[in-house]
Amino acid sequence: MIQTSAAPAISPSKPPAILSLIGDTPLVEITQFDTGPCQFFLKLENQNPTGSIKDRIGLSMIEAAERDGSLEPGGTVIEATAGNTGLGLALVAGAKGYRVLLVIPDKMSQEKISHVKALGAEVRLTRSDVTRGHPEYYQDMAMRLAEEIPGGFYVNQFGNPANPLAHERTTGPEIWEQMRHDVDAVVVGVGSGGTLTGLGRFFNRVRPRRGIEMILADPKGSVLCEYVRTGKLVESGSWAVEGIGEDFVPEIADMSLVTDAFEIDDEESFSTARELLNREGIFGGSSTGTLVAAALRYCREQTKPKRVVSLVPDTGNKYLSKMYNDFWMAEQGYIHRQPHGDLSDLVSHRYEAGEVITVGPDDTLLTACKRMRDSDVSQLPVVDQNGRALGIVDESDVLVKVHRDPTHFNDPVKTAMTNKLETLRPKAKIKDLLDVFDRGRVAIVMEDDKFLGLITRTDLLSYLRLHMPKQ
Ligand SMILES: Cc1ncc(COP(=O)(O)O)c(C=O)c1O
């Protein structure tokens, strides 16, 4: 049975005023990139209340369902969502007193999942490696739940006409006014297709006969770019950018509105988003990188000056542990370090660069424990003031000391650490590493007296995965 986790204590007759802050987002010109002969502007949808463009459709789809009676008081709002739509729905439907149940594929960032839960929504995680027709495919699962739960309303952003309507009635007119009725091209991504269809319809109406180009920015691996170019539906690949790209053409996505399409790979999307933050101070999510990379390509290809608009669909806050985390980027192979061709290439956190969490021999075991918990590791190298690795302390070393008498948490680390170190020189072989792991240890890499860092099983697995021959 599904239990309501947090019953919203609100007055549905007068929802909170934050809902009136959805939309009317600012537009800013990009000045620190080469835009060829063009002017390039970004609409900051990351400034909506829950940090994404999807707040707009959260409001329009809930209000449309209230009007047509498919959502009644006491009802449950159910959606299959990669996160942002869930946030918009959790905010709007929660504010209006409905129960919200979201089905989310398990590749989605933890930040988004924590955020919808904090807003009071219930979450069902499901597999992200299955496609349409599989019972655990997120959309099929949401549809089934809506049939099973009395008063259930399946929002279905992929087929809901109130989704594109939100953009036709709000996003489009806002851009038009902010650009002073002077726009040549709009660059969008397609998740559900709501943004594309809504903006495309609006701009066709204000400047008919394809007066404004609609450019698709699509992650490499998605089927949409190829569909626009050739009309063919190819087999999809995989991509790590969140919120855009599809393995099918969504019902509400009017792909005939697209005039040109660019395919952007994950690495370019991530590096562009990071550059946008560094150069312009604009903190966007991963899809912002895809849109901006495609828009910049388009701008640079032009021979005449054009005014080009794109979006920052969501905030970078949701990607701090992924795209904005250098270790994650390196581990996934998106940041390339100079290879040395030896074991030092497997050291993910380098001591010299201040990347290794360590503890001193005279620090207390309490400090060691807190540090392990805060950084989510189960062992710490013990390093003295001169940068010499003296030992290693792990959770079981601490447990042995404190389990009978917790006052030993105040004892110095040196009384509990293991000082028989498994040190390897960078020139050692992977086989030597495996021997260390077989003895249940982590490897400490030392170049003479210099501590370079640790290598764990996870580091070796990441390294092997990155160096796996391409199929
Ligand atoms: C994170 C994110 N979600 C959603 C969208 C828009 O998708 P939809 O096609 O659902 O309007 C975008 C568009 O760029 C996006 O970047």
Image (cartoon, rainbow, N blue to C red):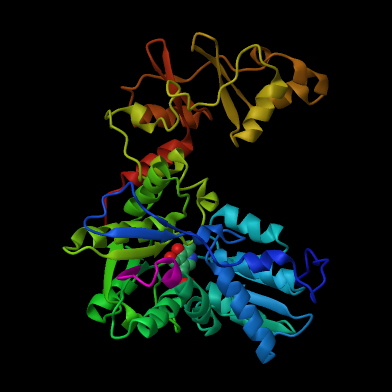
**Which residue is at 58% across, 34% downward?**
377
Is residue 249 among what the camera can see? no
**Which residue is at 39% across, 40% downward?**
330
Drawn side of residue 294 relative to residue 403, left or right = left
**Which residue is at 28% across, 85% downward?**
209
In the rendered image, residue 282, in percent from the top left (x then y), is placed at 45, 49
Magenta segment range? 175-186
Name the quarter where the C terminus is drawn. Answer: bottom left
In the rendered image, residue 260, in percent from the top left (x then y), is placed at 26, 73
Q: Is residue 182 magenta?
A: yes
Relative to 2, say whether 376 is above or below: above
Q: Nearer the viewer, residue 18 or 246?
A: 18
Drawn side of residue 448 relative to residue 306, left or right = right
Name the quarter where the N terminus is drawn. Answer: bottom right
In the rendered image, residue 357, in percent from the top left (x then y), is placed at 55, 26
Q: Nearer the viewer, residue 309 or 373?
A: 309
Q: Is residue 246 magenta?
A: no
Relative to 430, say whether 249 is above or below: below
